[in-house]
Image (tube, rainbow, N blue to C red):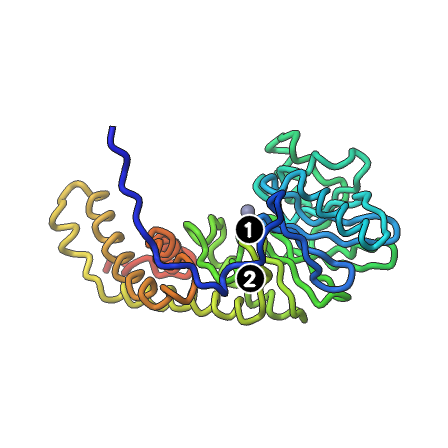
Amino acid sequence: MTSPALPDYAPIPRSSLGPALNDQGYYVGRVERNLYWVTDGVYQSAFLTTRDGVVLFDAPPTIGHNLQRAIDEIAAANGVSNQVTHLVYSHHHDDHAGAASLFDRNVVRVGHEETRRLLLRDNDPARPAPEVTFADRYTLEVAGERVELAWHGPNHSPDNIFIHFPGHDTLMLIDVVNAGWVPIYNLNLSEDVPGYIQAPATALSYPWTHFICGHLGRLATRDDVAVHQAYIADIEASAREALATVDPTPFYMRYGENAWAGVKAHLDTVTDRAAAPIIAKYTGVLAAADIEIFTRTTTFAIMQSLRLDRGPSGPVHP
Ligand SMILES: [Zn+2]
């Protein structure tokens, strides 16, 4: 057995990394006033301490029991309750919600109505469905603290919501922008490409200074969102250019009746041509831009959305 050679990549820019983790493998920090964030370096969660208890936003299983440890640490330091009374789901995905069942049965679970539907479908005991649901907007008030939840249509997932903390100058939107890093495969595994592309502009339409993006080791800024938008806009322009300039004829001629072989050769050529300048431009700017499969699959998804969602998919037969 030979093991595959593992490639080397460009160094991660220091600015894409966050604070050091403690011995238990987490970092907890203040976002503003009584709003805190927790990270294990890859996943992020947040919580609000109030005089009546703690409101937790997402429960990633990789942070797991460190969520309560982080809450205990902050509650003890500030002399407030460490009891989690509310859990808000950003969306139904297990990697952000799979530690939900660690919290008491009496906790009030809040989420979008589609989150409830999907969690009932998935029927995973680790992720109890929210009982408090909403369609477009919901104001969560706990002990005088206000959090505005809003659904602006599907993006990364059908149920992904915007969580605004108007009293804390903060917005939480998970799995769209990765602060200082490129999205992973297929625009961060997103289901709705036009919705995913639009989401950062919607995020920027809210007033905030701090942005909790759900991944990696630090909080994001408005500049991080703008760099992400530039990366996606560059891919879109490059995909448009490649679609317009690559002549498909030779690929279909080459493969004759094997139409799918022609499709593969054509679309792979368009994708590679569109992705190459983006990989070159963003290496050293966004961490992991040189993991080519990430930018290539994101480029492929955007190129297909240009054809299928925006149109035209091709010329109309005369
Ligand atoms: Zn997700």
- What residue appears at the point 46 percent right and 59 percent down from the top-left corner? 181
The x and y percentages for residue 71 are: 75, 47
Please indicate, yes or no, whether residue 243 appears anywhere in the rendered image.
Answer: no
Nearer to me, 170 or 259 = 170
Q: Secondary structure at mark 2?
A: helix
Q: Quadrant of the N terminus?
A: top left
The x and y percentages for residue 129 are: 69, 37
Alpha carbon separation for disc pair 2 and 1: 24 Å
- Of marks 2 and 1, the one in the foreground: 1
- What residue appears at the point 49 percent right and 49 percent down from the top-left corner? 191
- What residue appears at the point 66 percent right and 43 percent down from the top-left corner? 59
As drawn, 127 above or below 134: above
Q: Is residue 5 left or right of residue 71?
A: left
Q: Is residue 102 left or right of residue 262?
A: right
Any mark on residue 151, and which?
none
Please indicate, yes or no, whether residue 228 appears anywhere in the rendered image.
Answer: yes
Q: Quadrant of residue 13?
A: bottom left
The x and y percentages for residue 315 are: 27, 60
Nearer to me, 292 or 158 = 292
Any mark on residue 199, and which?
2
The x and y percentages for residue 137 are: 72, 57
Which residue has dot 1 on it? 41
Q: Earlier in the sequence, mark 2 or mark 1?
A: 1
User: Could you tell me the amino acid type at mark 2?
Assistant: Ala
Nearer to me, 126 or 121 = 126
Dot 2 crowding, Cα within 10 Å, few <14, some 14–19, many 20+: many
* Total labels drawn: 2
Q: Quadrant of the C terminus?
A: bottom left
Nearer to me, 35 or 264 = 35
Q: Residue furthest front?
A: 23
User: Could you tell me the amino acid type at mark 1?
Assistant: Gly
